Image (spheres, rainbow, N blue to C red):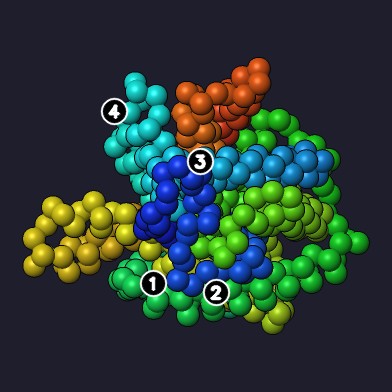
Amino acid sequence: MPSEMYIMDSTVTLAKSVDDTQDYNPLKERNVTHPTSTVGSFFNLLKSSLGSGLLAMPAALKHTGLIPGSLGTVLVAVVATHCVHILVETSRDISRECRVASLNYTETCERVFKHGPKKLRTYTQFVRHFVDYAMAGVCLGGTSVYVIFIASSLKNICDSAFPDHKYSVELYCLGLLLPLVLLNQIRHLKYLVPFSILANLCLVVIFVITCYYTISGIHDRAEVELATNVQQWPLFLSTVIFAMEGINVVMPIENEMAHPEKFLGCPGVLNSTMVFVALLYALVGILGYLKYGEEVLGSITLNLPDDEPLALTAKVLVVVAVFFTYGLQMYAPMDIMWSRLQGRLGQSYWNWAQVAMRTLSVVLTVVLAAAVPDLELLIGLVGAIFFSTLGLLIPVVVQTVHQWDRGLGPYLYVAWKNALLMVFYLIVLLSGCYSAVSAIIDKYY
């Protein structure tokens, strides 16, 4: 799964006053209190694309086979990288026109429509709300997958330790409700940072242990397919998009760089990170699929031996890492929802309203997880709807609107290119939803 999604930087840094006759360069006008180095930005972006979604890659390749899966991973990486690129370029262009030093994701979309073609300016507020709710949907959908990750791992551990007392995944989801509600009551980011550090350390150990088991038994590999039926491919696409997309944290990372001019370009922070991510995802997917074949599960840690201390350690660490990451991932949607709700209530109700909102949000994620307790299918569904919308649809639309009156390139290059990306998005959305929902109905109803 994806990886760990952080909060949007909701501040707009106002530009310094400049002579109206001079060209305005927003990159030189930023005044960041604690700027991040280029190397630090590389690791921040790497972390946003690497996470629990990495463990789902072998299951993704099961839906395509080795050859289409390997090529498809590279294709998704290229498309995801391009969409990040056009979002950042558009943000810089509109920042220059509006004479502000930096804009976050939502503000970029809002200002593009506000200063775009006159017929589209009336949709400015709708776009702002749509992007905010898409961001919240990504986080809430992603955290529902986290609930299944935790519940499935707990069930796997407990079934092995207590074979006479086996319970359903749904019951484990219900058991997680109170701990997750308490964790989600933390309202300040600084108190979540230690949990994030612990989760990162756990993920590193999990990755090393998983590689040890997959590589050590590769000579006894299971029977695998080079290519499967095309009808299974949509679940692969939505799973990889879920695992790889980290576009919601791109603007905060780029905005806080000490040298933002090094974010794009060749090699650049973005390109370097995504090349590494694509290779790592392909490697883990191929090794895991070669080792376990058609028996590979939604998280490869569920395939690890039940009776070996090292494998048990990885399974326990998955529970710890994903549990603590849950609180961090809920921060952004809680912030968005509270900003919408706060102004409608008297200040005396704020505390109880926050408690109720945070509790109901956790209940929603747990209910969704319990309704679709299959990790593979839930990842496919969430990836097809939420992650593709935030990572593909919105950047394509925003660039097209921004360039409409400014020129769409030689031979309308931008229009044709974005039309193809829109077709790709629709394929992921419609086929991914259809495949996931059909599989869910066949399995549970």
Q: Are marks 2 and 1 in contact (CB under 8 Å)?
A: no
Tell us which disc is closer to us: 1 or 4: 4
Q: Which mark is residue 93?
A: 3
Looking at the rendered structure, the kind of residue marked 2 is Ala
Q: Which residue is mark 2?
A: 199
Residue at 60%, 61% (x, y): give it.
259
Tell us which disc is closer to us: 2 or 3: 3
> Is the residue 156 above or below the residue 260 in the image?
below
Circle count: 4
Nearest the eye: 405 or 219: 405
Crowd rating for badge 4 (residues with CA inside 10 Å; few <14, some 14–19, many 20+): few
**Mark 4, secondary structure of its residue:** helix
Q: Quadrant of residue 128?
A: top left
Tell us which disc is closer to us: 2 or 1: 1
Crowd rating for badge 2 (residues with CA inside 10 Å; few <14, some 14–19, many 20+): many
Q: Are marks 2 and 3 in contact (CB under 8 Å)?
A: no
Q: Is residue 68 left or right of residue 442?
A: right
Nearest the eye: 300 or 83: 83
Q: Which mark is residue 122?
A: 4
Nearest the eye: 288 or 223: 288
Q: Which residue is mark 1?
A: 189
**Mark 1, secondary structure of its residue:** helix
Q: CA distance from mark 2 to mark 1?
A: 15 Å
Disc 3 or 4, which lies upstream in sequence?
3
**Mark 2, secondary structure of its residue:** helix
Q: Quadrant of residue 17?
A: bottom left
Query: Could you say where residue 277 lies in the image, as x and y percent from the top left?
Result: 70, 56
Looking at the rendered structure, the kind of residue marked 4 is Thr
Disc 1 or 4, which lies upstream in sequence?
4
**Mark 3, secondary structure of its residue:** helix
Residue at 79%, 71% (x, y): give it.
212
Q: Residue pushed farthest bottom? A: 309
